Amino acid sequence: MLSKGATTWWERWNGDTGDPSMNSYNHYAFGSVIAWIYRYGAGIDTNLSGPGFKEIVVHPHLDSRMPSARAEYDSVYGKIVSDWKGSPTGPFSLRVVIPANSSAKVFLPASAGTHVNEGGKPVTTQSESGENVVHVGSGTYN
C-alpha cells in the first residue's frame, strides 16, 4: 500500500487489481485494530474532560497472552510513550513519557495497597476501581 502511495488502509491488500467493484482506498475498519492496541494494549488514552491529550490516561490492560506492549503517540503537545512488560500475576514494569504541558493519570495493574516504586523510590498512590493510580506531570517515569 505504501509503495502505491496509500495514506490510509485500503479495504483489500490487493485493492489495486483494477476491478472497480471492490476497491475502497479509505477503509478504516482495519484501523480499529490499531486503535485497540494503543488504547487497551499499550494503554494510551485521553481524558475526555479536557482537550485532546492535555490530560492523558495511561491504563494498560494486562493479559497473560500478551507479555508486553509498547506504543508512541505524537500528540499536539509532544510524544506520549507507554512501554510495559509483565503479567497479571507476576512482576510488572512500565516506562511512561508524558510531553511538556500535559499531565497523566497512570493506572498500575496492581491491587490497591501494593507498594509502587518510581526510579527505585516509593511513590504515593491512590486507589481507583481497585487499582493503584499515580498522577504525574510531564517527564519520563519508570
Image (cartoon, rainbow, N blue to C red):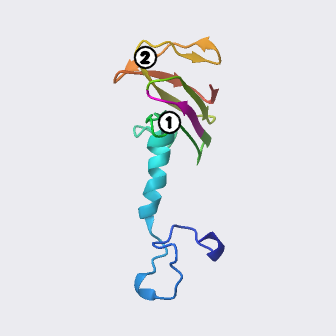
Residue where numbered disc 1 is placed: 56
**Residue farthest to the left, as pictured:** 129
Q: Which residue corresponds to the image point at 40% horizontal and 37% vertical from the top-left? A: 49
Q: Which residue corresponds to the image point at 62% horizontal and 69% vertical from the top-left? A: 2
- Please identify the quadrant where the C terminus is shown: top right
User: Which of 110 and 55 lies nearest the eye of the viewer?
Assistant: 110
Residue where numbered disc 2 is placed: 126
Residue 51 is at least partly visible in this image:
no
Q: Position of residue 62 (x, y in %)?
A: 45, 34
User: Which of 128 and 99 lies nearest the eye of the viewer?
Assistant: 128
Q: What range is drawn magenta here?
A: 81-88
Residue 137 is at least partly visible in this image:
yes
Residue type, numbered disc 1: Ile
Residue type, numbered disc 2: Gln
Q: Position of residue 45 (x, y in %)?
A: 47, 41
Position of residue 44 relative to residue 28, above or below, is: above
In the image, which disc is placed on residue 67?
A: none
Q: Which residue corresponds to the image point at 35% horizontal and 21% vertical from the top-left? A: 130
Element carrying mark 1: strand
